[in-house]
Structures are given as C-alpha cells and as structure tokens.
Image (tube, rainbow, N blue to C red):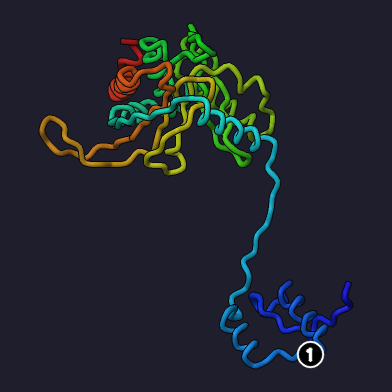
Amino acid sequence: EKDIDITRITGTGPGSRVTKSDVLLYLEQTVSGKPDQLSAASKSSVTEAAPVSKVPAELTSRKPMTPIRQRIAARLLEAKQSTAMLTTFNDIDMSRVIAMRTKYKESFLKKHGVSLGFMSFFIKACVEALKEFPEINAFVDGKEFVYHHYYHIGVAIGTGKGLVVPVIQNCENLNMAGMEQAIVDYVAKIKENRLDLADLEGGTFTITNGGVFGSLLSTPILNTPQSAILGMHRIEKRPVVVDDEIVVRPMMYVALSYDHRIVDGREAVTFLKRIKEFVENPERIIMEI
C-alpha cells in the first residue's frame, strides 16, 4: 500500500525479521522527513529492548483430524463429562497362567489353529466376575439402571488411526479358543480395513491391554455407556512375599475404572479381587468356581 522498499527497513524481530512495528516506525520517520535516520540512542534502545535472536523460529504444522479420531475424541470427552469415574488397582501373580500357557500352547495351536494368549484368560475371568456383580455389567440411563443378562466383551485394539473396540459377543458361550479366534479375526479385519460399525456396537464391558506397549500402570477411561473397563499392563518380575518369604514373581498391575453412579467402591474392589483370584488360579476359570 505504501510502496516501501523493504530493504531500507532495519528489522528488530527474531532473526532480524521486519515486523509491523518496524514498518510503522519507518513510516513515521518518513513523514517527519527523516527516513532511515534513527538516532543512536533510539537504535540502542531498540537493540536493548528486543535483541536479535540467532535461534531460528520454531516451526509448526497443522493436520486435520480424521473422522475416526474426531469420534474417539468426542467419546472420551463425553466419558469424562457425563460419568462419576473412579479407578481402583490391584496386582496379579501371572506365574500359573504363564506356566499353563507355556505347557499347552503348542497343543492348543495344533488343535484349534490359533495361539493361546493372555486375553482369553482375562475375558473368562471377567465373565465369571460379572455374573457375581451385575451392576458392573449394566449402565445408567437417565434415572434408571439397565442390566444386561449377556456378556458382550469389548477388546480395545490400537491401530494407526486410533483405538477401536470391537466386541466379542456372548462370551459366556465361548471357550478360550473361540475367544482367541474372535480376536484374531478382528485384528485381520482392522488391517484390511474391513471393520464394520456393527463390530463396535453392543459391548457391555471392555478390556484394554496397555501392557503390549510397555505400560506399567494407567487409569483407563470408560467406554460409555458402559459402567466399567479393565486395564491390563505389562508383566514385570518383582519381589513379593509368599508364605512369609520374599520371592520373585511375574506380576501385572490391573486397573478397574468404574462409574460411581451405579458401582460402589466395595463392589469395584471386590470385583477386581475376584479377577485376581481367577487369573492366579486358572483352573477356577475352567471349572467356573
């Protein structure tokens, strides 16, 4: 607009950049008949007030959120704002599960065509514990509690686009091979971008395993409208006291986040304790006792 030769202006911004203030000052000097004639005192004060930085300006970039990331963000925010969420913790001795898995993994794979993982043990344990605590398999709808008499367990799976929670339906009717096969099928569908919306709906309880990424401990966030979510973590050898002796055992921290509007602390703590008992004694899962 002013047809100014920018090379005639001394920049005082970072990296000697010419700022808006430099241009305005130059125009004032021009109007007064003294272009480029800043006094030594003025130049000194400018230098002292805004020293020229030799460090390059920080770079930023913008990337639009994908639709799935927008949906995830909305659901997480909804969970934080619309529930009274608390988290309780416990730890599990994984010795017997690891021993059982090591002993039978080859024969399990040969018979069922799928590997035996830890997730099926936890799904089984959760189903049995949910039968004892129906509030944890329910949700809040206005002024009512809605109870499910079936067990659709969501398993959180991390993808390059975000976290998705496909649902394994009617886990009470599945054996461990059926659960492991369902997980394998969902992972394949995710990789091939074949996951349907119906695969993500209808869950009554969710399990997430941050341990596969190395997480030691975390507070999982509710998958609304469900009233609880179980967080698994990495298995780490730690000293523990067994029969008054200090021994080293493979331990896993577990966390249960729950909606305090429907689930009381006593039920949440006892539910998590029951999962601990089932996993530490896997024969109880098989015998359902």
- Residue drawn at (21%, 41%), measured in percent from left and top? 239
- Report which residue position mark 1 lands on: 34
In the drawing, does residue 285 fall left or right of residue 81? Answer: left
Total numbered labels: 1
| Picture quarter with the C terminus | top left
**Residue at point 42%, 31% (across, down):** 231
Taking 36 as reference, is 269 above or below it?
above
Nearest to the observer: residue 56 or residue 192: 56
Amino acid at circle 1: Lys
Specify whether residue 106 is in view: no
Secondary element at image label 1:
loop
Q: Position of residue 212 (x, y in %)?
A: 45, 39
The x, y position of residue 248, in whole percent, is: 22, 40
Screen quadrant of the N terminus? bottom right
Q: Which residue occupies the extreme front position in the image? A: 32
Residue 144 position in % (x across, y down): 50, 9
Determine the image quadrant of residue 68: top right
- Can residue 62 be seen here? The reply is yes
Decide which of 107, 133 is in the foreground and name it: 133
Q: Is residue 170 left or right of residue 254?
A: right
Q: Position of residue 167 (x, y in %)?
A: 56, 21
Is residue 3 left or right of 231 when viewed as pictured? right
Density class for disc 1 (Cα within 10 Å; few <14, some 14-19, many ≥20) is few
Q: Would you identify the image quadrant in which residue 108 lies?
A: top left
Q: Which residue does the image show at 64% across and 64% down from the upper left?
A: 59
Residue displayed at 36% across by 10% down: 132
Which image quadrant for residue 24? bottom right
In terms of depth relative to the viewer, which is nearer, 95 or 200? 200
| Residue sticking out furthest to the top | 149
